[in-house]
């Protein structure tokens, strides 16, 4: 099955805000065999809508959307699921799966704690 992984960040009108997400995207692109895209929920391009449309046009059958969020707040409980559902209706040939946010993964929590401890001089 032809699949892709979409890293989804919130988005900002400030291009400098996007730089860390672009660095993660570049680093992962060198490590993963799975086709990878970076998209933004709002305020930035490429948007999630644009990215899903491009993948659907390219014949991608399945895409997992990994939110680059610390936690599932209102956006991930309401806005993004509604957005994904609407995109699934517009592009029925691509199965979309919204994954839990990266911040809820135990390894992410450990990595973040290690960075904070290092910055604190511990």
Image (cartoon, rainbow, N blue to C red):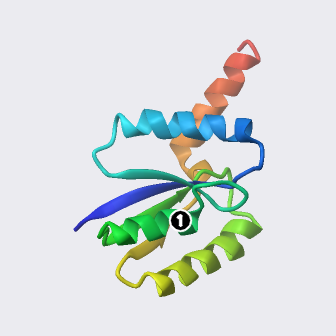
Q: Residue at coordinates 71% horizontally, 40% vertically from top-left?
A: 15
Image quadrant where residue 81 sits: bottom right
Quarter containing the N terminus: bottom left
Q: Is residue 99 visible?
A: no
Identify which residue, 30 or 55, lies in the foreground.
Answer: 55
* Residue, disc 1: 50
How many numbered marks are there?
A: 1
User: Left of 104 or right of it: where is 78?
Assistant: right
State left or right for residue 66 relative to residue 120: left
Residue 102 horizontal/vertical position (percent): 56, 51
Question: Does 83 sit above or below residue 3?
Answer: below
| Left or right: 86 as drawn, with respect to 30 | right
- Residue 86 visible at all: yes
Say if 88 sits above or below 32 in the image: below
Q: Residues within 10 Å of mark 1 (few under 14, many from 20)?
A: some
In screen coordinates, is 90 left or right of 11?
left
37 over 98 or under it: above or below: above
Instruction: For the C terminus, give its image quadrant.
Output: top right
User: Quarter-wise, where is residue 19 in the image?
Assistant: top right
- Farthest residue toward the top? 121
Residue at 52% across / 37% down in the picture? 24
Q: Secondary structure at mark 1?
A: helix
Q: Residue furthest left?
A: 1
Image coordinates for residue 90, horizontal then vertical, percent: 49, 84
Q: Residue at x 38, y 71 (%)?
A: 56
Residue at x-position 74% and y-position 64% = 73
The picture places residue 98, in percent across and down from the top left corner, at 51, 68
x, y (%) of residue 117? Answer: 70, 22
């Amino acid at each position: 099955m032809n699949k892709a992984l979409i890293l989804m960040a919130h988005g900002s009108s400030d291009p400098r805000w996007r730089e860390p997400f672009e660095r993660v995207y570049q680093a992962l692109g060198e490590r993963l065999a799975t086709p990878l895209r970076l998209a933004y929920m709002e305020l930035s391009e490429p948007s999630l809508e644009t990215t899903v449309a491009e993948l659907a046009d390219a014949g991608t059958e399945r895409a997992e959307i990994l939110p680059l969020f610390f936690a599932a707040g209102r956006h991930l409980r309401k806005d993004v699921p509604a957005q994904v559902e609407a995109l699934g209706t517009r592009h029925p040939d691509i199965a979309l799966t919204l994954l839990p946010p990266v911040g809820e993964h135990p390894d992410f929590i450990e990595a973040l704690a290690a960075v904070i401890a290092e910055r604190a001089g511990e």
